[in-house]
Amino acid sequence: MKFGAVNNYKNKIEDEVRWIHSKGFDYIDMTFEPVFSSKIKIGSIKKALQETGLGVIGHISPSLPLAFPLKSIRKAAWEELTKYADLFKELEIKYVTLHPSLQMPLVDIEKKFKYNREMVKKADKIIRDRGMTLILESFFYPFDTPGAFERLLDGLDRVMVHIDIGHCNLAGRNLSGGKDTTEDFFKKFGSRIVHLHFSDNYGKYDSHKAIGDGNIDWERIIEILNDYGYDSTITLEVFTDDRKHLIQSRNKIKEIINKVKKR
């Protein structure tokens, strides 16, 4: 298992690369946030990655309105995504995360699925044309269940799946009578799941709390990963005011992994 962290978008990415490496993480879950994307210095980032040997997974911001009903807004969003794809290619990234789009005001559910399928198909081509693999992240309603993902990914077999455990807790509390949906995703997609995000919450908000500061049963989550043979990347997506909680969360997950293994 490899553990990573998301860069703080307010800081220079090259500084974040060095900080994340210094704290013993295996990779950076690199996000380019649109408001700050003009400040990206790809040469400096490549230098920091070469110095540290840190791995990279790409992460496209969910705030990009890639499926917005207005064509002129979509055009600008796709230009931004294409810029990110070119940067990720230059960094020799393998996987790039995309979220289903919720930026669709006054659009009914069926059209949301239609527009999102079109979005995923287009993003998949852009990413594959640059030698990378697109991974779609479990998100919020209506894109928060294995059934929804089946609809989005039907016929798009080269797109892999990224499960956000915090989102699975929200889906379970709101739609499944209190049942977390993590295992349901693994039952449906199995080895197609190549990346995970871990953060805690109390089932109401995607609050990105430290591990243990919520109601997620992390021992059960690790048991599920073991049952399905998951041994890939886990990003601690912990966003608190004190980054010590990020490091403590990673260490706590490692302790739980060791505890479950001894059973």
Image (cartoon, rainbow, N blue to C red):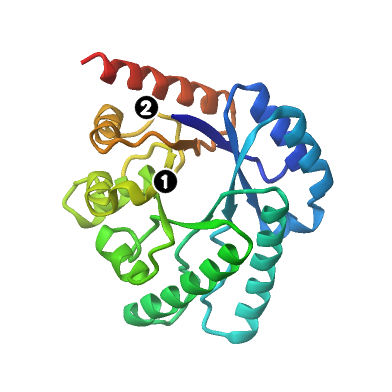
For the C terminus, the image quarter is top left
For the N terminus, the image quarter is top left
Which residue sits at x=46%, y=77%? Answer: 118
Q: On the picture, is 168 further left or further right than 41?
A: left
The local secondary structure at tag 2 comes to: loop
User: How many numbered marks have been drawn onto this rendered protein structure?
Assistant: 2
Q: Residue furthest left?
A: 177
Between 214 and 99, the one lying in front of the other is: 99
Which residue is identified by label 1? 194
Which residue sits at x=27%, y=58%? Answer: 146
Which residue is identified by label 2? 212
Residue type at numbered disc 2: Gly
Q: Where residue 52 sits in the image (x, y, percent)?
A: 72, 28
Which residue sits at x=63%, y=73%? Answer: 78
Which residue sits at x=62%, y=22%? Answer: 23
Q: Where residue 206 sits in the image (x, y, percent)?
A: 42, 47
| Callout 2 crowding tier (Cα within 10 Å): few <14, some 14–19, many ≥20 | some
Vertically, is 17 above or below 120? above
The local secondary structure at tag 1 comes to: strand
Q: Where residue 240 sits in the image (x, y, percent)?
A: 54, 34
Q: On the picture, is 202 further left or further right than 69?
A: left
Residue type at numbered disc 1: Val
Q: Where residue 109 sits in the image (x, y, percent)?
A: 33, 77
